[in-house]
Each structure stands twice: as structure tokens, then as C-alpha cells.
Image (cartoon, helix red, strand yellow):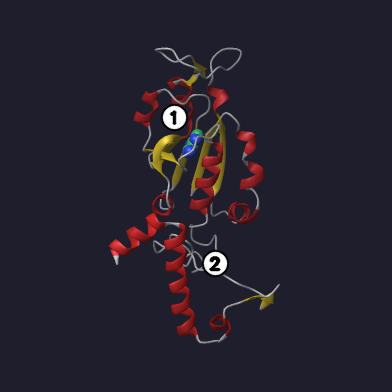
Amino acid sequence: MKISIISLFPEVFPAYLNSSILGRAQEKGLVEVEYVALRNFGKGAHRSVDDRPFGGGKGQVIQCEPVLKAIRSIRKEDSQVYLLAPSGCLFKQKKAHEMAQCSHLILLCGHYEGFDYRIEEYCDGILSIGDYVLSGGELAAMVITDAVVRLLPGVISEGSTEEESFENGLLEYPQYTQPAIFEGKEVPEVLRSGNHAKIHAYRQEQSLLRTKKMRPDLYQDYQKRE
Ligand code: ADE
């Protein structure tokens, strides 16, 4: 898979995306991450990419031309282009699985007051990572890249993503490690029993209880499906 990130600030990505699991995935050749500087497609001596909004209002809006030039410089027949904006559909684990099937993802990061609306017509989807406004799409691009790449075959050892939060519509059960007692807080007896059927049942129950407490919205959806 290849992921191309179009941004006005391409220098912010490598520190995170070249580390840990994502760094190793690139070294192993499981994913290629490319940064495309939107500024290179800007106009004039200042490589300008934005202008004032029609109808008035605060801030600047990113123009169609530089964005389309940037997309067209890298788009292939099988590319999927996603614009990152707080006004998009909420990005969830299901979408991460869907995107992990693509051979080329293009993630378009906005800044200022947003993009000229007409740019949306050239995209396959608009994604938001949550109900809050960030200064730009760069963090969203990193979040999406991380969530997608860890699902690619070979990136994480087989089976270890399957019991994570959201994979079955529930949050993950609590995990414990040594010591068995820390400052008087004891690891549940059942987890030290060696009885795998009981451990499985306990974890399933904890997963349900935690989801009910932390995410009643997910719990309700889960109950409807069961
Ligand atoms: N850009 C600004 N805020 C954002 C958000 N919540 N999700 C995606 N891109 C954004």
C-alpha cells in the first residue's frame, strides 16, 4: 500500500510516522508513505494557495487549483482521495478496515478556514476524526495512517488486533501484568487460575461492563445487534 499525504506542513509527519510500528512497517516495505507539499503547487512568488472567502467572513480558504494540481500529480487509476475536515463523516475502525484494502490512499490536509467546497467533488470521501476542531488536518492524517497501517498484513503479529477495542463492537477488557498485588490492588483471581474457558468468560463480561460504563452509545448498538 502507498499513502500520500498532501499538506502545507509536510515536515510535521516523519517524527511520528517513522517511529515504532509504522516505522517498521515502512522499513519492511509493507507501506510507503509519501509527503506532498501543497505549497509547491501554489501561485506566484509566495506560492500562495488560499484567498478570502466569497460572501465575506474571517480567515482564508484553500483554493481549488493548487489542491487539484497536487492531487493530479500523484493520482493513479486505483487511488482513493480523502479530504480531512471536521465537517466529514466520523472515522471509525470499520472505515480503517475498508481503507486498508486500498492500494493507494491520498489524504488531503486542510488549514485556515477550510477548502473551497468544489474540491469535495474530486474526493472519494470527507473524514473527521472527532467532534472538535483542530488547527489543520495533519493530526487527522497521522491518526488515520496509524489506524490503517496497523491493519495491513504483516505489520502486527497475526491475531493481535482481533481482541482490541471496537473489533467486535465492544471496548477491550482490562489487562494486567506483574506484580500480582500492587499497593494492595490485586489482579483478579480468575486471570491467575489457568482456566482458559473461565478467563474467556470473565474477559467477555468485563468487556461488556466497561463498554456500558464508558460508551453507552456503543453498548446500545451492541445490544441491538445481539
Ligand atoms: N481538521 C480540523 N479538524 C479536524 C477534524 N476533527 N477531523 C479531521 N480533520 C480536521
Q: Which mark is residue 72?
A: 1
Mark sitting earlier along the chain (2/1): 1
In the structure shown, which secondary structural element does the residue marked by tag 2 occupy?
Answer: loop
Q: Which mark is residue 157?
A: 2
Q: Which mark is residue 188?
A: none
Q: Looking at this view, is 73 or 170 the one in front?
A: 170
Q: Residue at point 55% right, 63% down?
A: 156
Indicate the position of residue 11 as horizontal and vertical percent values.
64, 35
Q: Looking at this view, is 172 or 75 the one in front?
A: 172
In the structure shown, which secondary structural element does the residue marked by tag 1 occupy?
Answer: helix
Q: Residue at point 44% right, 67% down?
A: 209
Kindly identify the amino acid type of the residue bearing the numbered disc 2: Ser
Q: Looking at this view, is 225 or 19 the one in front?
A: 225
Label 2 Cα neighbours within 10 Å, binned few <14 / some 14-19 / many ≥20: few
Q: Residue at point 50% right, 46% down?
A: 144
Indicate the position of residue 204 as horizontal and vertical percent values.
43, 73
Q: State whether residue 222 is above or below residue 94.
A: below
